[in-house]
């Protein structure tokens, strides 16, 4: 079986006409725009909204569509959907930390129906502003570990259950803006565990992002503790969410990760052996959509080190997937 989608995920500033042409030339048909994560995610998303509205950006997206590439957004959006400024008026909308104090630092209270409704309405607005012709929306909770709510109502919910409740709410909003919308549940860091009590709404699919993996070893290397921890629940997650639209979000060419998320970027070499083994493993599980973060490989990288290995990356996905 072959892959349905082969992707490449970049920061907005890395996007150029030349990149689009290279991606199309080697058969990549899915281009993700990733504003960035961490504490600056809301600000970066706001900057991306401005970037999206530019005529020059729309011209780039039209160029991509003409070359058979679907453009999508992959973003940590929760602190933008639920602005931290709302804490003063609605502290109960925000998570309770382990000490019992409400805090606006990260994420939200997944048991607050008012907060979930607010997030849903804001997700509708975001989907209207960042509409994607593919109808796929990758809206994610905050980019943190240990971000679950510990209030009495949330305490019985795992981090994965809380994330799925929030994703369901975001999906309901996106679907109001786009009746054909589907949305990814990000299995990542604390949410790699299988949800226990919350069920996904129809239209939620699995996005698997093993950021804490050892990229020098194949993901299915049973002798590698880091990778075993990332894959422990993967088959169960696929069974739980189903394989339809399921997507691997890997880090094979994520130079932001290899550069410790600091510019100027470091030089990067594609580990072809690891990637080949990874792709075989994912394909054997039934994944038909694979992409990688490919940030920090834009004009500044090219000026320092030359072209990134796009053709070889695409070739491995097409040969094995």
Image (spheres, grey):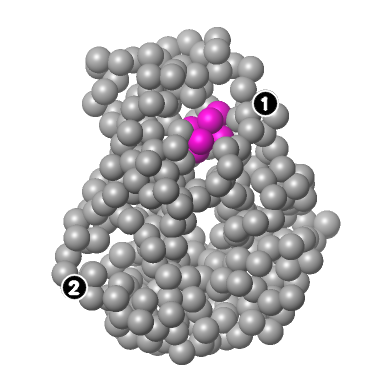
Q: Residues within 10 Å of mark 2 (few under 14, many from 20)?
A: few
Q: Nearer the viewer, residue 50 or 297?
A: 50
Answer yes or no: is residue 79 visible.
Answer: no
Answer with the quarter of the image where residue 121 lies.
Answer: top left
Which residue corresponds to the image point at 75% horizontal and 72% vertical from the top-left? 280
Look at the magenta stretch and give its main secondary structure.
Answer: helix
Answer with the quarter of the image where residue 299 lies.
Answer: bottom left
**Residue found at the far left of this picture:** 55
Alpha-carbon span between mark 1 and mark 2: 45 Å
Answer yes or no: is residue 69 visible.
Answer: yes
Task: Give the SS element for disc 2.
Answer: helix
Which residue corresponds to the image point at 55% horizontal and 73% vertical from the top-left? 6
Residue 27: % across, % down: 52, 84
Q: Find disc 2 in the rendering and name its residue.
A: 56
Quadrant where the image shows the N terminus: bottom right
Task: Give the SS element for disc 1.
Answer: loop
Which residue corresponds to the image point at 58% horizontal and 42% vertical from the top-left? 202
What mark, if any, has residue 197 been given in the picture? 1
Asked if residue 216 lies in the magenta stretch, the reply is: no
Q: Which residues are magenta?
A: 162-168
């Amino acid at each position: 079986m072959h892959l349905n989608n082969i992707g490449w995920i970049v920061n907005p500033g890395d996007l150029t006409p030349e990149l689009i042409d290279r991606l199309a030339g080697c058969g990549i048909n899915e281009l993700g725009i990733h504003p960035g994560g961490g504490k600056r995610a809301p600000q970066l998303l706001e900057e991306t909204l401005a970037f999206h509205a530019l005529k020059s950006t729309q011209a780039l997206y039209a160029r991509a569509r003409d070359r058979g590439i679907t453009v999508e957004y992959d973003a940590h959006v929760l602190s933008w959907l639920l602005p931290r400024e709302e804490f003063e008026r609605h502290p109960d909308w925000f998570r309770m930390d382990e000490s019992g104090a409400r805090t606006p630092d990260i994420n939200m209270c997944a048991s607050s129906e008012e907060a979930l409704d607010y997030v849903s309405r804001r997700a509708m607005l975001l989907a209207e502003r960042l509409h994607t012709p593919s109808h796929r929306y990758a809206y994610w909770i905050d980019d943190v570990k240990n971000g679950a709510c510990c209030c009495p109502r949330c305490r019985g919910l795992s981090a994965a259950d809380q994330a799925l409740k929030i994703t369901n709410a975001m999906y309901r909003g996106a679907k109001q803006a786009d009746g054909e919308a589907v949305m990814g549940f990000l299995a990542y860091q604390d949410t790699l565990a299988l949800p226990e009590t919350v069920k996904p709404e129809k239209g939620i699919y699995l996005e698997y992002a093993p950021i804490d993996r050892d990229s020098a070893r194949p993901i299915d290397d049973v002798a590698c503790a880091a990778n075993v921890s990332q894959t422990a629940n993967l088959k169960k997650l696929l069974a739980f969410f189903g394989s339809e639209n399921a997507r691997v979000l890997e880090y094979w060419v994520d130079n932001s990760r290899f550069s410790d998320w600091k510019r100027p970027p470091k030089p990067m070499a594609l580990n072809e052996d690891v990637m080949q083994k990874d792709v075989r493993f994912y394909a054997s599980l039934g994944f038909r959509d694979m992409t990688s973060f490919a940030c920090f490989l834009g004009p500044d990288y090219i000026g320092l080190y030359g072209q990134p290995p796009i053709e070889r990356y695409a070739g491995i996905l097409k040969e094995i997937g």
